[in-house]
Image: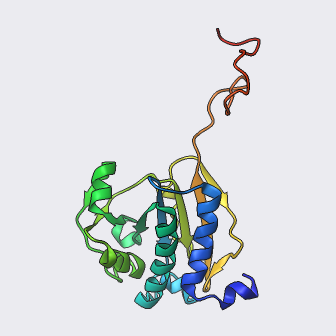
Amino acid sequence: MTDQDQALPVAGQVEKALSELAEVAALGAGQIVVLGVSTSEVQGRRIGTSGAPAVAREIYEGVRRVRDRKGFETVWQCCEHLNRALVTERSLAAARGWTIVSAVPVPKAGGSMAAYAYGQLTDPCLVEAVSVDAGLDIGETLIGMHLRPVAVPVRPSGRWIGEARVTMAYARPKLIGGERAVYAPPATQAPPSGTCD
């Protein structure tokens, strides 16, 4: 982290990292970002030991700023005590066909971040699993299980939010085919020699 990044409040650090991810992944309306957060790690403590709603509020604010600008949706990963279920709006869960599960995250079962996010949503629910477009992991919470293949790592300019390590990725479509496969539209209409036609 640069000296300039360290001077930013947590919300500013989150906003900067997520803005970089949104730019690289071209995130916008119709796309979904999963967020995994350890508020303990942000404070320099071991994950799961010192949850802090005040830190969760700062992180949520940083995410909200970018989400409002870019138009993507968010889901918030719970901790392993709720099997890493995700907090989301019920309308998004219904639209995506996600399996809703019965639990309400609290700081000691779900985590401070998931509990805070749950309290901010209009009609929150938990879903069992998702397969989404991008993710921001603050504190090594292991969000990879919620990204659709193929995950492409993004290196943020600031590697830390507070004292927590930051990991980011976005998903790209799988490249299929062999040596004849083309991954961008051809510049001309004339078929190349040796086609399957």
From this view, report whether residue 7 is shown above or below residue 25: below
Give coordinates of residue 63: x percent, y percent.
Answer: 49, 73
Quadrant in which residue 137 is drawn: bottom right
In the rendered view, how is the structure colored? Answer: rainbow
Residue visible at 57% across and 42% down? 173
Give coordinates of residue 176: x percent, y percent. 62, 31
Classify the position of the N terminus by image quarter.
bottom right
The picture places residue 126, in percent across and down from the top left corner, at 30, 64
Q: Nearer the viewer, residue 101 or 1?
A: 1
Task: Give the quarter of the image for residue 18.
Answer: bottom right
Q: Is residue 36 left or right of residue 125?
A: right
**Which corner quadrant holds the C terminus?**
top right
What's the residue at 48%, 61% (across, down)? 33
Q: Is residue 181 left or right of residue 80?
A: right
- Identify the residue at image location x=48%, y=67%: 67
Residue reaching furthest top? 197
- Left or right relative to 20: residue 59: left
